[in-house]
Image (tube, rainbow, N blue to C red):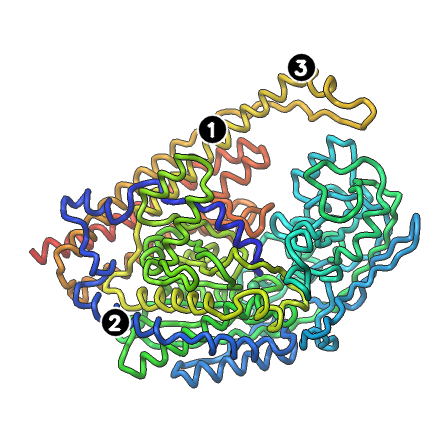
Amino acid sequence: MISLRSFVAFAAIISAAHLPSARSAFAQSAQTPAADTSRLAGYSSQSSQTERDWEKKLQAGVLPENLRQNMQRLSARPHHVGSPYDKDNADWILSKFKEWGFDAHIETFQVLFPTPKERIVEMIEPTKFRAKLQEPPVPGDPTSNQIAEQLPTYNAYSIDGDVTAPLVYVNYGNREDYEQLDRLGISVKGAIVIARYGEGWRGIKPKVAAEHQAIGCIIYSDPKDDGFFNGDDYPKGGWRPREGVQRGSVMDTDYPGDPLTPGVGATADAKRLDIKDAKTITKIPVLPISWGDALPLLTALQGQVAPEAWRGALPITYHVGPGPAKVHLKVASNWDLKPVNDVIATMRGSDAPEQWVIRGNHYDAWVNGADDPISGMVTVLEEARMLGDLHKQGWNPKRTIILCAWDGEEPGLLGSTEWVETHGDELQKHAIAYINSDSNGRGFLFAGGSHDLQHLINDVTLGVQDPEKHISVQQRARLQRIARAHNAEERAEIRKSNDLRIGALGDGSDYAPFIDHAGISTLNIGYGGENDADSYHSIYDDFYWYTKFVDTDFSYGRALAQTGGTAVMRLADADVIPYEYNAEAETIERYVKELEKLLKDKQDEITERNLELKEGVFTATADPRKAYVPPPAKPVPPFMNFAPLKNGVEAIKKSAERYQSAFAKWQAAGINLPAQTAAALNADLMQVQRTFLTEKGLPERPWFKHQVYAPGAYTGYGAKPIAAVREYMDQEKWQEADAQVPIVGQVLENVAAAIGKAADDLEQALRQAQ
Ligand SMILES: [Zn+2]
């Protein structure tokens, strides 16, 4: 589900840690010399050495040729949910896991998955035009002609509908775009909107259009965003061609997974909602089209010229409308239950089998999906082969390793969500981490996740080499951030921190149920940013295209398998789970400061706007020959009391400091913790991330239980930390926002207590050892 382009965006927004590094902070607070660098975090000196040896073997064993062969096999035919080749792939993956020594099985759920029955986009005025809605095969591309098996171009979970209305161009179709339309005096009430792809989750476009009383939505791919504006288009180059279409889900953001079984596993006998009661199906019909199909529609629009930032790369003057173009849009789907088949493989832990390290990637695609998702899936398979190989050589992971090949990610994280919901109780007791990947490409390391794993992934990626630059991938990511930093202060922060800050996660891939719903520490990893290509969710995302334009020699696939495999081993073998809480505390502190700044900015903005309204600035400066409506006056937001959040942050900082100080002492002293002590400590550590959950969840999205990490209701993919407070602030519901503060504050106090308990355990163990 993650797009190539979103990798670039993610890499640009993450910046380095604010505080001194975890390692130097340990050293300062513990009054001891810096930790011995030969000792891995969470390991004794002896277990460190053994671990390093095994990890080196894994890294050396990863073979690009296997990645290539497995990609060719898995992407040979279209393999969307419910298709014959999707099941064929599941069986093949299962056989591979078994061959490599895993205990593996397929777990099946029954989910609502609509497929197209009827699709029409046609212009009936001022001229007639019928959209093709078909991606043509490309000569030389051997899988682009598998038309009989290709899922037609559509947006899954669009409601059925048949509407005819004037057309309005709404740019990306986000909330801000409609504010701009208000200024232009244009309403979309009763209209069909045409939005371009990009800038957030596509499901937001029909959602916001419906909120503004539009009756239909068309989404097209503008060449400025992923076509010829960026480079030669396919097949000469790798960019989306004239008739290329982005398929994709438009499920609403109330909850991921099967629309009919929110919160529970979609097992055969699960209680299901009626389709009409499913909250995540769109309110208006929506279809995606190519720029070739969009061009006649956009050309026929008149009315005001679109604001400069709204103009794409087509050779026309972009007008907003409404009309005179009048469009007929018809969508009808087969609303069937389809099986999703998750392939689950287990390697039982030797010392602590009750603790699980989980690694996953999806294998379902919209069509052939060489990039999305097979480029990521083959790295997980190669990790599996190597873990099996090491196991045969005598390596036994302390903890249980569970590898997951998810089905049904593309429609809405179906396979992973239903699995997490089905196994919720076990996961609460056993899961110590989930590591996700999705698409993979050339370029820079990308890592997002819960910040208790920030230090771990930094440590791991210091030991992985960039295949093209021959420096560590962590170092390369650091240098990229320095190059992209906005000012001297940002650059200074990046330079002085040992650990690079990882981004917060929204809900762009299968990690969402783990972190957002189940409170399991999570990482999402991959490489990207140098792909001179984009054919996201099209028939052209295939083996021929990927091996010509993306990671052509699979060297970054090798880097991802090395990264993922090492992270899994490091977590599975550690004496003490290597969570690090200073980074977690510092990150939450930043989030709270962002909330304070958000309020201040809003107050300033509205105060200024009200003043300008009084002065007559808007009416005096608007061109009288163009329609213009000044923004409305608004009450200035009241002050909020953020004290409970700040107190919560202080409490977490104190416990984190205590825990990390004891941890550093333990590492420096080289004491072996007695097995029972380590077991009790790890059991307590495992519960810390769970403590962020509340039973009630977010106020208007109860499926989302985590009170710090969550996607936004209007951003989709993107994260909105402390969403309970922030979402109300975004909606300018100040009282509601204020009322959430003490609830989240209490959660932070509980987290501080949970970290404090782990600190008690470790301090006691150290006293006993002396
Ligand atoms: Zn994907």
- Distance from disc 3 to disc 1, alpha carbons, whole Å, reads 26 Å
Which disc number belongs to residue 516? Answer: none
- Distance from disc 2 to disc 3, alpha carbons, whole Å, reads 72 Å
Q: Check contact, mark 2 vs mark 3: CB within 8 A.
A: no
Could you tell me which residue is drawn at 71 percent across and 77 percent down? 146
Counting residues from the N terminus, which is met first, the one under dot 2 or under dot 3? 2
What is the three-letter code of the residue carrying label 3?
Lys
In this orientation, which residue lies closer to the viewer: 582 or 35?
A: 35
- Distance from disc 1 to disc 2, alpha carbons, whole Å, reads 54 Å
Q: Is residue 40 left or right of residue 669?
A: right
Residue 86 visible, this orientation = yes
Q: Is residue 413 left or right of residue 100?
A: right
Which disc number belongs to residue 53? Answer: 2
Could you tell me which residue is drawn at 40 percent across and 49 percent down? 479
What is the three-letter code of the residue carrying label 2?
Asp
Q: Is residue 411 left or right of residue 356?
A: right
Residue, disc 1:
640
The quarter of the rendering in which ligand 1 is drawn is bottom right
Residue, disc 3:
614
Classify mark 1: helix, strand or loop.
loop
What is the three-letter code of the residue carrying label 1?
Met
Counting residues from the N terminus, which is met first, the one under dot 1 or under dot 2? 2
Where's residue 246, x and y in %?
68, 60
Q: Residues within 10 Å of mark 2 (few under 14, many from 20)?
A: few
In the image, is residue 489 above or below residue 129? above
Residue depth check, mark 3 versus mark 1: number of the one nearer the observer: 3
Q: Is residue 280 left or right of residue 719?
A: right
Residue depth check, mark 1 versus mark 2: number of the one nearer the observer: 2
Counting residues from the N terminus, which is met first, the one under dot 3 or under dot 1? 3
In the image, is residue 210 above or below residue 329? above
Classify mark 2: helix, strand or loop.
helix
